[in-house]
Amino acid sequence: MDDLDGLERDLRTSVRGGVDFSVTARALNTMDASNYRRVPLGVLTPRDGDDVAAALEVCGRYGVPVVGRGGGTSIAGQATGTGLVVDFTRHMNGLVDLDPEARTAVVRPGLVLDRLQAAAAPYGLRFGPDPSTHSRCTLGGMIGNNSCGSHSVAWGTTADSVAALDVLTSDGAAHRLGQGWQGAPDGLRALLERELATVRTGFAPYAGLPRRISGYAVDALLPEHGTDLARFLCGTEGTLGLVTEATVRLVEAPPAKALAVLGYADESAAAEAAAGLLPHGPLTVEGMAADLVPPGSGLPRGGAWLFVETGGATPAEARAAAERIVRAADVVDSLVVADPAGQQVLWRIREDASGTATRMPDGSEAWPGWEDCAVPPARLGAYLRDFRALLGEHGLRGTPYGHFGDGCIHVRIDFDLLTDAGVARFRRFSEELAALVVAHGGSLSGEHGDGQARAELLPKMYGTELVGLFERIKAVWDPADLLNPGTLVRPARLDENLRFAPLPREPVDVVFGYPHDGGDFSAAVRRCVGVAKCRVQEGGSGSGVMCPSFRATGGDETHSTRGRARLLHEMLAGEVVTDGWRSTEVRDALDLCLSCKGCRSDCPVGVDMATYKAEFLHHHYAGRRRPAAHYSMGRLPRWLRLVAATRTAALVNSLASVPPLAALGKRLGGVAPEREIPRAARTTFSAGWRPGGRRGDGPRVALWPDTFTEHLSPQVGHAAVRVLEAAGIVPLPVPRARGRVCCGLTYVSTGQLDRARAVLQRTVEVMGPVLDAGVPVVVLEPSCAAALRSDLPELLPGDARARLLAERVVTFAEALERLAPDWDPPRVDRPVVGQTHCHQHAVLGDAADRRLRERAGLVGELSGGCCGLAGNFGFEEGHYEVSVACAEERLLPAVRAAGAGDVVLADGFSCRTQLSQLGDRAGRHLAEVLAEGL
C-alpha cells in the first residue's frame, strides 16, 4: 500500500464510525478461529450502511481489499484479510424489528445470535440455526458462512431462514435481494441463463445432501428453485457483497424439550444409528466420542453418544417423545433428561467440543483444516471408517464429532503445522481426504464454509467448469475483486498464510514452567484458537467468570482473553508488534486483565491469561522502574509484616483516616483516589491465637496464615479454628522459626516473579516439617489457596517439595468434608447470596463448599463472575470504573436484591472489601457464619 496515510485520512473524513490503523487494531484482527493469519491495514467499525458504502468507495479508489467480520469465529480463514477489516459487532449490532405474527425479524449483521433468540423467546419463537458459538457468533457471519448448528435436522441452514438481504457491492451500490431477479447486479441473469445446463448437471449429484455448503449455491438461482437471490448469497463468505441488514424467518419453538443421550460402543456405531432416528422427527441428532468428554460428565455408559432432542407441547409430551426414541434405538445405555438445567449442563459438553477438540488426550495440539465436511447421513458410518483408515495411513489422530443426523462431521487433527515436513503432510492428507469426501457423495464444507482451508480443492467436488462459473459470477458482482479476495474464487493455497509460520521455533526464555505446554510459552499462547467463548457479553446468568473486563468495557476485543492472546501471538511473531516484551500495546491490553483466572477453567482450551500477564509484566519491567502500585500493593505482605513487627497498626490506621494524608498516601502508592485504605488489624491472627486449648485426638491440619487473614481479617481465622475444633479437627500453626510463609500472590499478580520465586522457595523450606508430618494445609483465603495449588508448582517446576505442598493444600470446606465426614455442621437455615470467588471457581472448585452449605441449611446459589476488586487490580489508579462495572454485573445486584435476613457470603478478602466499599451489606466468610451457628 503506497499511500496508507491517505487511505486512513479519507476513511476518517468519509465515515462516522471508528477508523483504527493502530498496531493493536491490526494485531487483533490478523486471525479468526482458523489455521490462517493475514495482516490487515486497518479496521473500520461502521455505524450504519452509509458508513459501509462510503468505506467501499474509498477502498475502491485505493484498490484496497475489504473483508467483513462478525464474531471472528470462522474456522476456514474467511474472516481475515490484508486490506480493511469491517467489524460489524461494535455498532451495527442491533435488532431492528421483530414481528411475532409474521414470524420475521430484521437484524443488523453484527447482532449476536443469542440476543435474537432472547428477543424472540417471549413469543415462543426462535431462529432455527444455532451453531455451538451461538453466544458470540453474529447473524452476518452466519449468513456469510450459511451456518447451521445442532437443530438443522429440524429447521435447516441459515439459507433456509433468510427472507431478504440488504447488500452493498464493492462499488458501494445497494441491492435488495429476495426471490426473483430484482436487485441482481447487471449481467447476472444473462450469465445464468447461458449456463443453465452447467448448473443443473453440476449440482445434481448433491441434490439430496442436506449440508452442501461448499462453493456458490448457484442452483438457488434456477427457475425451478424460485430464483432465490437471498438464498444464493448465503454462504458466499463476503466475496460478493456486504450485508447491512437482513430479514430472517423465525420458527415456533416447542414449549417443552427433552434430551435423550444415547450411548454406543464407538463413534461408528453412533454414526450408523443416526440416520435411522430421523423418521422420529427429532430436533437434533448430535454425536461425539469419549475422547471429548471430561471425567464425571454424567453421560450414560458408552464410547460415543448421540444427543437427541425432542419437543412437545408439555414436558410430559417431550419426555415421551424422547423415550420413544430410546426404545427405537439399539443402545448400550441411555439417559433421558427433561429438566432444562440438566439439559443445559449436558449441552455444554457438546458445545465445548469445538474447544476441547483442540487438544488430544495426551495434551498435544490438534488443528482445524478438516474441521468441517458432510456426507449423506446414510453413508456417515462408512465414511467415518474410511476417514479413520486415512488418518492411520498418514500417522494422524483426530476425534470426529458433530451433526451426525445431517452427516456433518467436525474434527481437529494433530497436524504438525510448525515444520515444512508437517505442512507437506497436511497438504497431502487434505487432497486425499477431499477425494474421499467426494467419493462418498459429500461436500467439503458442511457448515463453516470453504475459506482458505478448502476452496483450493473445490474443483475435486464441482469440476473445473462449474468452478470457472463461480469465477465469472464473482466478476459480475465484484469486478475489481475487492471483496475478500483469495477466498472461494481464485483462492490462496491451503498451506499458505499459516498462523504459526512467523512464531519462533525455539522455546522462549520464561519463568513459569508451563507444564501443560511442554515449558514452551509459544505453545501456551497457541492454545487460543479463537473460538471466542471469552467474548460472551451476556454474563448475567450461569457460574462462569471469563472475561469480566471484556463485558465491563462494552465488548472491546482488546480486553477479551482472545484479544490479549492475539497480541501476545503477534508479539512473538514480531511483524506487527515489533518491540517484544517491551510492547506498550501488549501492556495496555493486559492492564485491564483482572487476573481472575476465569479463562483457566471457562476457556474450552484452558488459556491462562493471568499467568501470561504475570510473565509479560516480569519481562516488561525487567531492569526498569515499575508502577507505584507494584511497590505498594505488590509487596503488601512485606509492609503488613513491618506494621505488625513495629506494632504501629493503630498509628497507620489513624493516619489513613486523615483525608489529606490518605490522599497523599494513595497518590504515592498508585492507589485509586476513590478507594478507602483497608485497616490493619491491631493484633494479627497468629498473635491472637493460642493453640492447644482443645487439642484432642482428631486429625491434625496446619492452618495457613495467609496475609489477608493474618493482618487484615483475623476474625476469619479465629472463626475457622472454632469450627475445625468443633468438628474434631486439630488446627496447628505452621512453623515460623526460620521465616514467614507466603503464597507469593501479590508478587505474581504484579509480575515480580523473581521475588515470588524467592518467597516461595523460602516458604517451601519453612514448611518442611509440615510436609514431613503429612498433614493437610488448610488455606482460608481462596486466592492464596489457588496460588499455592497452581502458581507454586509452576514457578518451582523442578522442586518436588513445592509440588507436594501444592497437593497438600485444601480449602476450609474440603478439610471438613475429608477429615470430619460424620460431623454435622450447625443448622443456619437461611438463604445465602454472594459470589463464588473467581479463583475458587477457576482453580479450586466449589463442590465441597456447596455440600457444606447444603448441610448447614444455607440455601440458594451464589452468582458467578468476579467482584471486580481482584486483589490489587481494583485498588490501582485507573481501574476504579472497570472494577465497579464488574461488581455491578452480578455481585452488587444480587446483594441488593437479598432479603434482610439473607447471609451474604464472600470467602475472599477482595470480595468482602468490594462489598463494604460499594454496597451497604457486609460479606462474611463461610467459617464466620458456621462459627456463629455454633
Image (cartoon, rainbow, N blue to C red):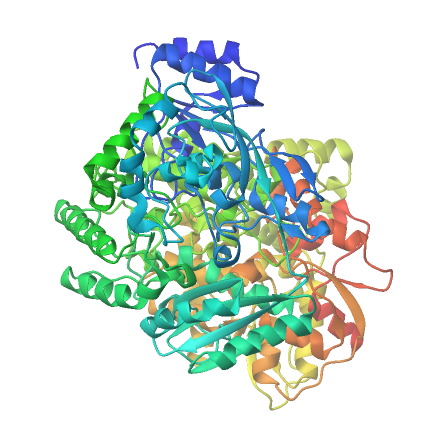
Q: Is residue 445 left or right of 28 when viewed as pictured?
A: left
Residue farthest along the bottom direction in this orientation: 697
Q: Could you tell me if residue 722 is visible in this image?
A: no
Residue farthest along the right direction in this orientation: 900
Q: Could you tell me if residue 694 is visible in this image?
A: yes
Q: Is residue 388 left or right of 271 when viewed as pictured?
A: left
Quarter holding the N terminus? top left
Q: Nearer the viewer, residue 433 or 3?
A: 433
Q: Nearer the viewer, residue 34 or 719?
A: 34
Q: Nearer the viewer, residue 594 or 741?
A: 594
| Quadrant position of residue 58 | top left
Q: Which residue sits at x=67%, y=67%?
A: 717
| Quadrant position of residue 471 | top left
Percent x, y of residue 906 = 69, 60
Percent x, y of residue 284 = 50, 62
| Quadrant position of residue 814 | bottom right
Q: Which residue sits at x=47%, y=35%?
A: 228
How many marks the image carries: the answer is 0
Q: Which residue sits at x=37%, y=31%?
A: 582
Percent x, y of residue 67 = 40, 28
| Relative vertical location of residue 682 with respect to residue 308 in this rendering, above or below | above
Q: Is residue 736 left or right of 921 when viewed as pictured?
A: left
Percent x, y of residue 638 = 54, 50
Residue farthest along the left direction in this orientation: 421
Quarter holding the C terminus? bottom right
| Relative vertical location of residue 540 with respect to residue 848 in this rendering, above or below | above
| Relative vertical location of residue 298 with respect to residue 794 in this rendering, above or below | below
